Structure formats: C-alpha cells, structure tokens
Image: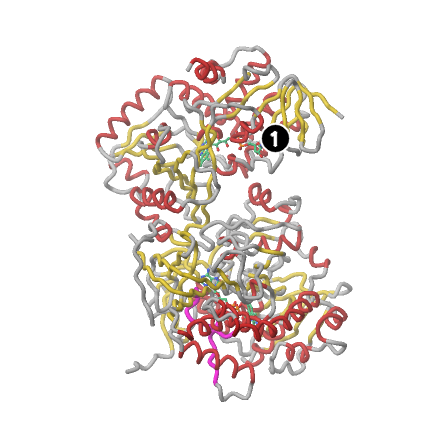
Amino acid sequence: MHEPQPETVQIHINGKSVRVATGSTVAVALTLTEQACRISVRHEERGPLCAMGICMECRVTIDGVPSRLACQTLCQPNMDVRTHG
Amino acid sequence: MSSSYDAIILGAGIVGAACALECARGGMRIAVVEGDVVGGGATAAGMGHIVIMDDSMAQLELTRYSQLLWAELAPELPEDTEYETTGTIWVAADQQEMEEVYRKQAVYGQQGIVTKVLDRPALRKMEPNLHPGLAGGLLVPSDAVLYPPCAARYLLEQAVRHDAVVVPKKAVRIGNGRVELNDGAILESQRIVNATGTAASDLTADLPMRKRKGHLVITDRAPGFVRHQLVELGYLRSAGSSTADSVAFNVQPRKTGQMLIGSSRQYDADHKEVDRSMLVRMLQRVQQYLPGIADLSVIRTWTGFRASTPDKLPLIGPYSDDPTIFLATGHEGLGITTSLATAKLLMNYFTGSRSAIPLEPYLPSRILLEAQHA
Amino acid sequence: MASVRQHSFDVLIVGGGPAGMAASSTAAAHGHKVAIVDDNPSLGGQIWRGRSFSSASKRAADKTAAAWYRKVQNAQITHLSGLRVFDSAQAGVLLAESQDGPNSQYGQWELHYRKLILATGAQERFLPFPGWTLRNVLGAGALQSMVKSGLPVAGKRIVVAGSGPLLLAVAAYMRAHGAQVVEICEQASMGQLAAFAFGLLASPERILQGMQYKLQLLGTPYRTGCWPVAAYGTQRLETVVLSDGRRTREIPCDYFACGFHLVPNVELPALLGCHLKNGFVEVDPLQQTSVPDIYCVGEPTGIGGLEQALVEGEIAGLASTGRVEQAQPLQRERKKMQSFTERLEKAFALRPELRRLPDAQTIVCRCEDVTFSQVREYASWRAVKLHTRCGMGPCQGRICGTAGEFLLGWNANSVRPPILPVRFQTMAVAPAIQEIKSQNG
Ligand SMILES: Cc1cc2nc3c(=O)[nH]c(=O)nc-3n(C[C@H](O)[C@H](O)[C@H](O)COP(=O)(O)OP(=O)(O)OC[C@H]3O[C@@H](n4cnc5c(N)ncnc54)[C@H](O)[C@@H]3O)c2cc1C
Ligand SMILES: Cc1cc2nc3c(=O)[nH]c(=O)nc-3n(C[C@H](O)[C@H](O)[C@H](O)COP(=O)(O)OP(=O)(O)OC[C@H]3O[C@@H](n4cnc5c(N)ncnc54)[C@H](O)[C@@H]3O)c2cc1C
Ligand code: FES
C-alpha cells in the first residue's frame, strides 16, 4: 500500500509558513524565499556555498536543534526552521 | 660562529615569551630560541584560564600575584588576545561541597581576594544552564580568560621591540654557557633559561617532571550559554592527585561565543591521540552539570601535555649542577596564569632585587635536594 | 542521553556515490553482509543523486546509472542513509551520527566491520575573490546539487566559472532545466586544454564527450583563459566581473556558479591512518590502502571521474571478498584510465594569476571571517590557525585550507575527531564495543 505523496510540503521559516516541492532541502526553501541561513562573525548574510555538507555555511536551527545543515536536510511537514541563530 | 647574549631563553611558549620580555625590558641583551611556531606547544593546547588556585599556600601566592600582573597588562593586550575578566564560579554539587565553598572563601579572604558565595537561586540566576539541582558555588570575579597563543606572540613582539632577537632554531645541547643549535651554530651566555615546557628534560637531565595529558573539546558558537568559567569543586582533588586518571567539569566561555571544555588528567599517556574513553568520561561529566549542552555541536577535540612536578609547583631559578643553566618550566596546568610572575621572579633573581613574593618555594633545589636525601 | 545502535558487517562502504555503489553491489554478490553508509538522504553521490534513470533511455550514461541502481537494489545491502561517519572508535569500528532521512533520529551508531571500503568522493575547490561570500555565489557542483534537490532555475541568469569539466556538465544541466546560462568561463587556456587533454580540437563538445556527456550547450559562450575577479551586490549577488588578463567585463546575473575543479575528501582515510601521497590516498592495484583491511576507491585516490570510480569500486568489492582473480581484467581497465586522470590534472592546472584573486579585505576563512591581509604573511597552516583563527571554525579548514594550499603553499592536513561537527551528546556516548548485534536487509 502506497500513500499518495503530497506534491508540496509546508514548513515554517522564522515563524512564516512556506510551501516547497516535496523532496526539497531546507537550503532550497531558504534560497527560494531569498533568505540568508546565518549571519557571519562580521555580520554578513550567508547562504549555501558547497551544498554537500562541507562548508557549514548553511547552519540553521531546525525544530529547536542548532547547527543543522540546511543543504542536507529535507523539508518535512511543519518543520520549524530558524535562521541567524 | 658564535654570538653572546646577557641571557638566552629557550622556547617561546607563554613562559619563554614572558621571560624574554621581562629581561629585555630590564635592559638585557636577549636571544629567544624557538624551534617551532611561537606559542605552539602546551600554550596552544591549554585553556587560558587566568585563575587563582589554593592547592598550597605557595600556589595561592603565585597565582594571585600573576593574576594581578595580567590585570595590569590587560589594557595594552591586542584584541586577538581575547582577554576577558569573566570570573570563575567554583560549583558545589551538594551541601558537603558548600562547606568547601566557605573554607575557600575564608582562605581567599585572608589574602584580600574578593569572592562571593552563591546559594542555589543565586547560582541559577547567574548561570541558568547549570543543572538546577546544584547546591551553589563560589564566585571569584577577578579571574579571567585569554587566548594563549596570541598572548605569547604579543609578549614576544614586545620583547623584540626591546631588542630581543628571535632565533628560529632548535636547541640540541646546552651547558657551560653554550647553546648548540640544530644548524651547528653556537650561542653563548652566562644565563641560559630552559623554558621549553615538557621538552625541558630533553635538554636538562634528571628533571623531576612528568608529562600529564589533558583532553580538550571546543563547540560551535553559542553566545551566552555560559558566562563565567565554571569549574567543579572536585577539580582541586582531580588536579592535586598524583596517581589516578581523572576528569572534572571545567567549561570556559570564549570571547567568540564558543565553549572550551576540559579537563582530564592522565599520567604516562605519551601519544597525542585523543583517547575516546577519557573523552567520553569528560563529556559525560560536563553533561551532568550542563544538560542543555547536549544539542550544541562539537567541532574539534585535541590533547595537550602539562609539565608536572611532584608538588605541582613550577621550577624557577638556578639548576644546581651547572651555574649557567636556569629553569622556567614545570608549570603543570597553570603556566598561562603563572607565566608573568615566573618572569618577574627570574628577573629579580638575575638582578638580585627584592621580589614581590618569595622565590624559595619554586626553586628547583627544593625537589632536587629532596631527591638526593631520599 | 543519546542511544547507541550497534551493527556489524563483513564489508562496510563509506560513501554512496558511484564508487561506493559499485563496491557494495559487487561485494554483496556472494552472501557477504554488506552495508553502505552516506550522509545524504539518498544514494547517488554528487553526480547521480536526485535524478531517476531508466534503462530504456537512449543515453548510454543513463543506462549505466540505471544498471548500477538496479544492482544495488537487487543485492542484499543494508542502506544507512543520512548517517555521517565522524570518528573511529578503534580498529574495526566507525562511529556515525544520524542526519536526516529514513534513519532520522539523533544518536550514535557504532558500525563494526571486517573490511572497510572508503568511497568518500571529492569536494569543489573554492578560491576567495572579492564578493565570493555574497548570497547566491556558490559552487558549480553546488548549484547543480541545489537544483537536484528542488531549486527551480527556469529563466534565471547564471554565469558558470572556475575550472574543470564539471563547469560544462553543470551548464548543460542548468540549460536543461530552463536556465539562461549567460556564459561559461574556464580559467585554463585553450592551448593548455588542447595540449593535455582533448587533442587539437579542444571544444566544449569534445570535453563533454570525453566525460560521456551527451548534453547540449547550444551556443552558450565557452570562454577559456578567463576567470572571475569580483562579485557585487548588497548582501545578495547582482553582477560578476570576469577577466581575461587584459580587459574585464561586468555581467548581471542571478546565480554565480563557481568552483575550481575538485579536491579529494581524505579526512576519514587520514584519520584512519591511511598513507597519503600528494594529497591523495595511496592504494595498491587492488585498491588496498596502507592500513590492512581498508580499501579506498573513487576520487580520494585521484580525480578520475565516473568511469574510474565505478571500476575501482568493483575491484575493491571483489578484493575485499577474496575474489582477487576476478579483479584482474578490471585492473587492466583501470590502468588505462590512469592517463586520463593525469591529463585532466594538467589540462585544468590553475594559472598563477589566480593567486592574486583575493584583495586585502577579502575574507578567506568564511567560518571565522579572517581576511587575506591577516593570513598572507603566514607560511605554515599551524601558525596561521593558531595566530589568526583561520581554519578554526566548524568547517575545520576544508574551504580556506584548500584555498590556502594553492594561494600560499600551506599544507592543511591536521585531522582530528570529529571529522565533521557532531552533537555533543553523540560524542558523549561511550562505545559499547564488546557485544555485537547484527542486522541485515
Ligand atoms: C589540557 C591543558 C589545559 C590547561 N589549561 C590551563 C589554564 O586554563 N590556565 C593556565 O594557566 N594554564 C593551563 N594549562 C597549562 C599551560 O598551558 C602550560 O603550563 C603553559 O602553556 C606552559 O608554557 P611553556 O611556555 O612552559 O611551554 P610550551 O608552551 O610548551 O612552550 C615550550 C616551547 O619550547 C619550544 N621548544 C621545545 N624544545 C625546544 C628546543 N629544543 N629548542 C627550541 N625550542 C624548543 C616548543 O616548540 C614550545 O614552543 C593547561 C595545559 C593543558 C595541557
Ligand atoms: C560538487 C560536485 C559535483 C559534481 N558533479 C558532477 C557532474 O555533474 N558530473 C560528473 O561527471 N561528475 C561530477 N562530479 C564528480 C563526480 O562526483 C565523480 O566523478 C564521481 O561521482 C565519483 O564518485 P565517488 O563515488 O568517488 O564520489 P561521490 O559521488 O562524491 O560520493 C561520495 C559520497 O560519500 C559521502 N560521504 C563522504 N564522507 C562521508 C562520511 N564521513 N560519512 C558518510 N558519508 C560520507 C558523500 O556525502 C557522498 O555522497 C561532481 C563532484 C562534486 C564534488
Ligand atoms: S552549503 Fe555547505 S554545508 Fe551546506
């Protein structure tokens, strides 16, 4: 038995809800909505660089857990994403 | 080829750098011999806690004196030294340890050191991430934190401004007023200061010193997670023991917002590799005190070696066999703190001037003599 | 407190790209208990992940991919996706942490093995230039990876730059997804490409062919001897500036996909004590490293691309399960590919002008925001780390250390556990090494 896969999922980024295609990573959701992942030591906005879990530029807080990599995390229904943490 | 100096300092760790500056500022012609990265030895491994400790009266005097010297120097330290007067909280787990808090407060008070006893609510207010079941603690507001490799580099730069010469070579043999370098060159001086940390016994035979390994862990940035250096009161037992392997809760907030975590103590573990079982014991201890640290991320672990003497006090001053050789080593887990006082005491000895605290408890002869009598 | 899960295997493969897939399906053929672990939500590595392949496809490359996926599916292999190996507890035991995907639950995994095959792939080399930290300036493979994981690029203006055959693959992929690829800008000169790699008629099509790509670039300008010098924008990218050494051009775009060829991921092999030579893991003709029972395949042994990764995977799959004779024909095949790897390296060698890309204020270490003026006096990696914090952040020098090797001659090789950041509680779990349970399927 296969449940039909909904084509989009809804997640919450800094409290705002965002809908993205199922299978999208959190990094994709942030890039689509033109948001930075984190603020650097000298207060620059940063987004993904390597998209493969190496550079650590895409660190965000997911469901309360800090330093998760947005580029290696798939959006799950109602996931709570906090940037600039 | 040979060149001659008023003093030659071997090693540019924090101790060697401090000695170089003190002597150069006093008008001596100084050469500093460093075979590797400046501040790259134990100085690059340790925690950089400027801390007053009272394992013995001599330790209390030396650390207190040093801590005042650091506070005096602080305004001129560059940004990258990350000097910050965070204060220390000695954390008491239960009522029995609270007794120790009061004892410690009395001892510190006799030396004019201001402290504050924290009960359970006060501790909770100051450090909300500590386990709520902890009984209290003792705040020592004057303790500080810094970044040792940059501090060593700064001290050395200042020495160079006072005309000290840095010789980027390794010393291979010393004695009778001569230092032989790995390229065959010879330096000459009537004062050769062996400040090579745990390597000191390679150049000077029969030093009463053992290596004592420690593990360290650094987390990603989480500003404000803790605000003071937090150390369990049991730390004194751990640091003071000279037998068993031990771990103690010891967490330091860095100016970067990271948490630097110590501390373990192991004798006779000579390799630099991280020992997982030691690491795990240490981390589990930390998690008992700071449950919320579980979700922070660890970015690196490493180890360092302390140069440890039988009475946990450094070796400062002449070394009995050879009148041209002086020691400035054996600082165990306190060399960052006690480097500045070590330099003052050594310089006072060279000039024959009165020192702020007596040198006797740190003279190498105390242990060397004891060994001869035994 | 976090839990430990213990599993034990005859052959454990780290890395779920083509090399790891070939190794695992080959090793599993004779009833050996095999597992493949990868930190991403699904298998496929950098090249295959996030796409579906059909054996009915007209394209040979797709057929190959489909065939390997089928082999992996049909074999008895334990898939451990979303698990990141961060340390080695002792010989024969790796420690991993869950990231995301089917095994998503934080906690420590203890993976026991008799034989280990390392297939950890490569990363892009990034070089710092003014503006490279702006949002939407990212790696070439990185942008591709983002599109594979859901980023729509239809109608977006994209400039692809840096070095290596990957640029072409990425540009073709972007076009296929409706992007407007403004131009492709390769730092190597046409002469260099022609001399070493692709004969006298070096052309994008020839290079793509050489990589077994049948993708079309349809008139997208491919400029050789051309490199990026700056990117501008307020927080987010607006334009890039390209140079050929004589004149510069400023081009507006939405994404700047820029990477300078690949560097191998050798942290885990290094942590395990495998001997490295010129930055690559040294292996014998059976893909065995200097450490007994540890094999290495794919990019960590040399940037050789897909074909070589597959063959090496097969060889190790056979060798690790005692079928050495069967590996012999494959070894001959691999040997032939060796010269391709060497030619590739020479063809895309970085030009010295690139050492002048960063200006004094350019950030070199992105984790700690350390600028070029702070680091350029240092000749040693250890010294620059200790005195400037360059390389001390969570990426542990994977980006800045790699750049510094080219820019300043550093030897950025100090691996310590964890090889990638890990939860405190995961690190704090005691390995329960004695009792070994097992699992399959
Ligand atoms: C885990 C740990 C935690 C610690 N935490 C603290 C703390 O919180 N607070 C504190 O005060 N102290 C702390 N310490 C102690 C402190 O780090 C040391 O006491 C101090 O760094 C010693 O400095 P040093 O200059 O004597 O030695 P080192 O820093 O080791 O310097 C010796 C130098 O000599 C050089 N050298 C060696 N041999 C030769 C040779 N033959 N020729 C030329 N050069 C040579 C070396 O390259 C090196 O640079 C800690 C130590 C450890 C290991
Ligand atoms: C960013 C990028 C994009 C690329 N795009 C293309 C392309 O479009 N076309 C092309 O021909 N070639 C491309 N390549 C080259 C291509 O990856 C290789 O030629 C080929 O895939 C080699 O396969 P591999 O199995 O050796 O490595 P990879 O495919 O890189 O697979 C290695 C896998 O191991 C995983 N891994 C690594 N370390 C750990 C760990 N500690 N724990 C768990 N898992 C781990 C990685 O996440 C990865 O999934 C690209 C390379 C990179 C780096
Ligand atoms: S973008 Fe580099 S780690 Fe996620």
Q: Is residue B140 above or below residue B349?
A: below
Q: Label 1: state its secondary structure.
A: helix
Magenta span: C38-54
Residue ID for mark 1:
B156
Residue B349, position as x, y percentages in the image: 56, 14
Placement of C36 over or under B219, stated as above or below: below
Ligand 1 contact, mark 1 (Cβ < 8 Å): no
Color scheme of the displayed model: secondary structure
Residue in view at x 37 percent, y 61 percent: C98
**Residue B63 x %, y %:** 44, 24
Quadrant occupied by the C terminus of chain B:
top left
Can residue B102 be seen at all in this image of the molecule? yes
User: Which of the 4 image quadrants contains residue B240?
Assistant: top left
Residue B97 placement: quadrant: top left
Write the residue at 49% across / 53% down: C271
Residue B84 in view here = no
